[in-house]
Image (cartoon, rainbow, N blue to C red):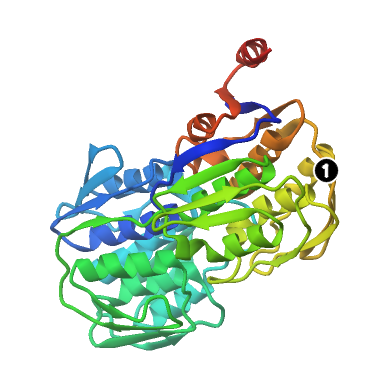
Amino acid sequence: MEQYVIKGGVRLQGEVSIGGAKNAALGILAAAIMTDETVTIENVPNVRDIRVLLQAIEGIGAKVTYVYNNSVQINSGSISDINVDYEYIKKIRASYYLLGALLGKYKESQVALPGGCNIGSRPIDQHIKGFKALGAEVDISYGKIHTKAEKLVGSHIYFDVVTVGATINLMLASCMAEGDTILENAAKEPHIVDVANFLNAMGANIKGAGTDVIRIKGVSRLHGTTYSIIPDQIEAGTFMFAAAATKGDITVRDVIPKHLESLSAKLLEIGCQVIEGDDSVRVIGSEELKSTNVKTLPYPGFPTDMQPQMAVVLALANGSSMVTESIFENRFKYVDELNRMGSKIKVEGNTAYIEGVSGFTGAQLAAPDLRAGAALVLAALAAEGISEIEDIEYIQRGYEDFEGKLRSLGALIERVDSERDVQKFKLKIG
């Protein structure tokens, strides 16, 4: 079983380039099957979730070609099946984007119920409500969702809660519907805008993405295009917080600084220096981190996917902090692991109460989910001594060559799959 072995206590320094946004890529790759022409997508992150989705797209008959590193060509003219039952698709949450894409193009879709990280209840009722509003029948049975429509007709859809997944899915399903669709109380995340821009590049007519009202005029067909995915806000944030946790100095390149403003604001609040360039952000950690309070909110608020990394940094800050999770109810599973490293965190309901400590010590750890796993890596990098982190397949779902990028900043980290490799690492670093 693969794991990370890490010797902490090194200040991370240098530059790191950020890959394409995983959450944007998942929506864009699903959207690519909505035309019969060839689509070229650049800056595709080579992470597990993306590979699974591409295999699922191949499984229904599309042709998928890796042109070179991080560029993919998809031609869906040969799709022969609207039933996505690929064995692994249950493991990724974004499998449900194929529902909207196939329904929009073929007026029918059948996809295994989605999985992903166990960070709390993520119902798909808003997706189903939207599909029905467009005129589709929706049936859930035998572990699959089946949607079917004689024709899709534009509609006014108001989301009861702000939901990224349903906003993207309804953009996909409605962009080839007859007439106009209005999505109200829509999510505003950067990857919503990116999926809308990609669909528009294929000939869709979508306005208002990035605001809470998205207006879509249906078109009869979509065409091929070449498109480059935006940088990953959460990967960038993870390296920014790595600088804070290790008292390091990291320049994060190939980013859109505006997407990182909620993170930069909190880093400034706790005493770090943040220097923005046109497409870079430099974070210089502070010897004495200050406490603060954080509440996760939909974009442009503080992202739930950065909440565990924030908690690690605040656990090393002077004084008392509070982290309130308002998006998912099961996102503090990493706290027990951090407390074994010497942190003082108590969870009550949806709030973590943190008393800062002067440092962590290495421990045997297990990653409970994707972002919590990345946070434990940051904690191990800041800790005194050696840590071993199991279940790193969660981390590999969302970070491309995580250990390689960290090593380029001076981190002492190896991915190993045997006790012998662990001992070799310990001997090598002395």
Place residue 176 in its image quadrant. bottom left
The one nearer the camera, 393 or 265, is 265
Instruction: Reply above or below: 373 against 258.
Output: above
The x, y position of residue 314, in whole percent, is 75, 53
Q: Residues within 10 Å of mark 1 (few under 14, many from 20)?
A: some
Residue at the disc numbered 1: 339
- Classify the position of the C terminus by image quarter: top right
The x, y position of residue 46, in whole percent, is 38, 40
Place residue 326 in its image quadrant. bottom right
Let me know if residue 333 appears in the view: no
The x, y position of residue 215, in whole percent, is 33, 84
The one nearer the camera, 325 or 408, is 408
For the point 65% across and 40% down, the residue is 378
| 201 relative position to 404: left or right | left
Instruction: Reply above or below: 279 against 126.
Output: above
The one nearer the camera, 381 or 174, is 381
For the point 83% across and 44% down, the residue is 343
For the point 43% across and 86% down, the residue is 157
Let me know if residue 153 appears in the view: yes
- Mark 1 belongs to which amino acid? Asn
The x, y position of residue 333, in whole percent, is 73, 50
Element type at marker 1? helix
Place residue 264 in its image quadrant. bottom right
